Image (cartoon, rainbow, N blue to C red):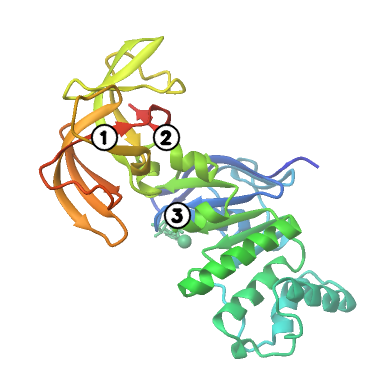
Amino acid sequence: MSDVVLEFRDVLKRFGGTTIVDRVSFTVNRGEFFTLLGPSGCGKTTTLRLIAGLEVPDGGEIVLDGQTLAAPAAGICLPPDKRNLGMMFQSYAIWPHLSVFENVAFPLRVRRVPEPDIARKVTEALELVGLAGMEGRGATQLSGGQQQRVALARAVVYTPSLLLLDEPLSNLDVKLREQMRMELRALQRRLDLTVIYVTHDQSEAMSLSDRVAVVNKGRFEQVGTPQEIYERPRKRFVGDFLGRTIIVRGIVRGTASERWVELPGAERIAVPPETDAGVTEGTRVRVLCRPEEVTLLPGGESAPNQVTGRIETVTYMGDHLEYTIRAAELELLMTASKKTPQPVGAEVRLQFDPQAVTILP
Ligand SMILES: Nc1ncnc2c1ncn2[C@@H]1O[C@H](COP(=O)(O)OP(=O)(O)O)[C@@H](O)[C@H]1O
Ligand SMILES: [Mg+2]
């Protein structure tokens, strides 16, 4: 069997005149935990519904395990029950009038699995999610976390090729959410499940995923490991969505063998070698960096990869200090240790790590 479980080729979905999924292509590999991360309304749920067969694409092709699920140009669109998928959507609560057993057994009954196999599979699935022996309970007698586990057992009970999870933890309180997050990841690894997970929560995406697709207005802005998208954002949107970024502007100078970005005060930051080939002499660029990669030094003679600035405000944050610093004609927000506090008005230098900056045109 091929390593690719799911493939999107130029998939397009419109509602009315609005493009919701904008010619998206990606693949998900066997055993992978793949997350769609993006703000509310960016098209994450619609993407899952296209996979599930609850929406019909307007263009492109969706392939699962080598089988074409949907290809409008060829007139193909398999109904949901002909797709071997497990689903757990935020809005798909468990059925309150059914027992735990019947809730979990439901997908097997739909697939006409023989009765003795149903009993065995339900018992196994409940064991997996830590609800062994709860078969006879009414669904409403369970706590929120237990109900979530029942929904998870129902989603994995018939060993789907692909498990679709749409913000499954968002109705839980913070503590339970973190616990369920770890359980979910452990279960996924144990069963070697292939998962597509949807969330708008960046820490959830970072902690759970093998790879993350950052989605904005129906487009996949960047797909990569949590580390890649955090440390090497290829778009401003990606950098901002995943946490704080420090951004300064300048113009690229130098030759192919050695380039740097010249900042307004004639200071310079070296261009890392892996920078996009489109960044050449004279290009106006932004230099992006995570605040934790920038070191705050006391004022003094500026060296390469340093930017001088002046502290405008200092805010006490309990375990650290937060400074706003005017530097390179911009206002930058920096956090720093309480050990060597700097007063308002102090001149400082920001030491950039040239290995940790991203240059964007
Ligand atoms: N059935 C529909 N008809 C019209 N517009 C829809 C429909 N479903 C979703 N949308 C719109 O598509 C956009 C993306 O929705 P959705 O995929 O639910 O986003 P997300 O899950 O990322 O929050 C939203 O603007 C939403 O209003
Ligand atoms: Mg949604």
Residue 9 seen in the current view: no
Q: How many residues crowd mark 2 within 10 Å: few (<14), some (14–19), many (20+)? A: some
Question: Callout 3: 10 Å neighbours few (<14), some, many (20+)?
Answer: some
Residue under the image location 74 percent in, 76 percent down:
126
Of pointers 3 and 2, the one earlier in the residue sequence: 3
Residue at which label 2 appears: 234
Q: Percent x, y for residue 85?
A: 69, 59
Q: On the image, numbered disc 1 is attached to which residue?
A: 350
Mark 1 and mark 2: span between their CA atoms? 23 Å
Instruction: List the single residue furthest toward the front.
Output: 339
User: Would residue 166 be found to the left or right of residue 303 on screen?
Assistant: right
Q: Callout 1: helix, strand or loop?
A: strand
In the figure, 3 relative to 173: above or below?
above
Q: Mark 3 points at which residue?
A: 202
Q: Residue type at mark 3?
A: Gln
Q: Determine the CA span between mark 3 and mark 1.
A: 27 Å
**Residue at 14% over, 50% down:** 313
Position of residue 323 measured from the top left corner of the image (x, y, whole percent):
21, 48
**Lower position in the chain sequence, tag 3 or tag 1:** 3
- Label 3 – label 2 distance at C-alpha: 17 Å
The secondary structure type at the circle numbered 2 is loop
**Residue 65, position as x, y percentages in the image:** 74, 46
Q: In which quarter of the image is residue 245?
A: top left
In what element is the residue under mark 3?
A: helix
Picture quarter with the N terminus: top right
Query: Residue at coordinates 45% horizontally, 53% vertically from top-left?
Result: 43
